[in-house]
Image (cartoon, rainbow, N blue to C red):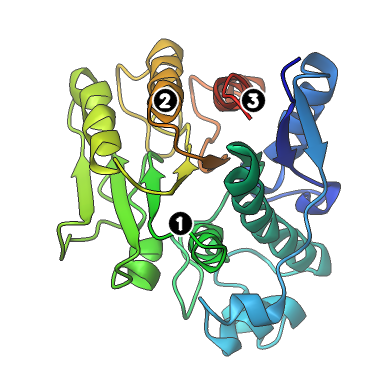
Amino acid sequence: MTTPLTVFYSDDFIVENPPLETLEKPRLVADRILSDRAGTVLLVAPTPATRDELLRIHEAEWVDAIATGEPSDIANEVFSWSPSYATSVFASTGAVRDAVSHALAHGAAGALSAGLHHARAELGAGYCTFNGLALGALAAIDAGAATVGILDVDAHNGGGTFSILGSNPQVRFADVSVNSYDRWSPTADRHHRVTVDSADEYLEAVEEALAHLEGVDLVIHNAGMDPHEGCGTGGKHGINNAVLAEREALVAQWLQRTGTPAAFALAGGYRGSGLDLDGIVDLHMLTVDAFAGLGR
């Protein structure tokens, strides 16, 4: 009998009257898992990230501003601060760390976390508060991984993650974007970044990114669905449900073939003229289902 895929989530992720899908969609994905994937996917509450953990990747002034709301001018750079917002980002950041730890032990896991890869040491940016990808990578290294690969296929570049970990020789980057936001420049052979101009080039670019990660001990998959052509923030004409389903299948097949442990995070996915919230959940379930098919 196949062991269920463990995915980390709690209702602490959710903020009432959320200003953005990042703070709303995790519950809807969790609801879909509970209703349609019972026995295949197991939801587990994460341990929230601690202040000490976050100080490894962020400056104290930023961490404390989010924890307390003071000074408010810093905290409000990302979203309007509230106690539930602070609870949310500490919980969702910890979920990535927990997913990484579980993946190292069992082969695959996930976190229903979003709003990660633009956050820098000193400040959040681009709807991202704390950089859970960076925290997860360091947790994997602490647990004995010699090399960690970050596969970032969000529509936008992961410049925040690169600013924190780009100089770390144990971290390999593979960043495939369709939008120039938060672009960064490679400075070593372990850095791979490409912005795709045409949907016809997209899947080949993902395959090249995966090849760049060959041999790492763990992959953290920032599985953004905002490249979708209907997305109002970053979408690329011609990248539709079928293309993104093939992308997730490519990732899962590569992980299976190479025997590489992996943890995913939801990352981007936003409403647009051709994409409603139910459609966003459908897209994120492509990742969940692809990872549920991996051996654990």
**Few, some or many C-alpha atoms within 10 Å of disc 2 (few <14, some 14-19, many ≥20)?**
many
Seen from the viewer's position, the closer of residues 30 and 251 is 251
On residue 281, the disc is: 3
User: What residue is shown with label 2?
Assistant: 228
Q: Provide residue 227's location: percent of width, then percent of height.
A: 38, 31
Place residue 143 in its image quadrant.
Answer: bottom right
Discs 2/1, front: 1
Seen from the viewer's position, the closer of residues 101 and 84 is 101
Left or right position of 28 against 141: right
Q: Provide residue 167's location: percent of width, then percent of height.
A: 28, 73
Q: Provide residue 20's location: percent of width, then percent of height.
A: 63, 47
How far apart marks 2 and 3 lie (CA) works out to 12 Å
User: What residue is shown with label 1?
Assistant: 117
How far apart marks 2 and 1 lie (CA) works out to 18 Å
> Element under label 1?
loop
Residue located 42% across and 10% down the image: 242
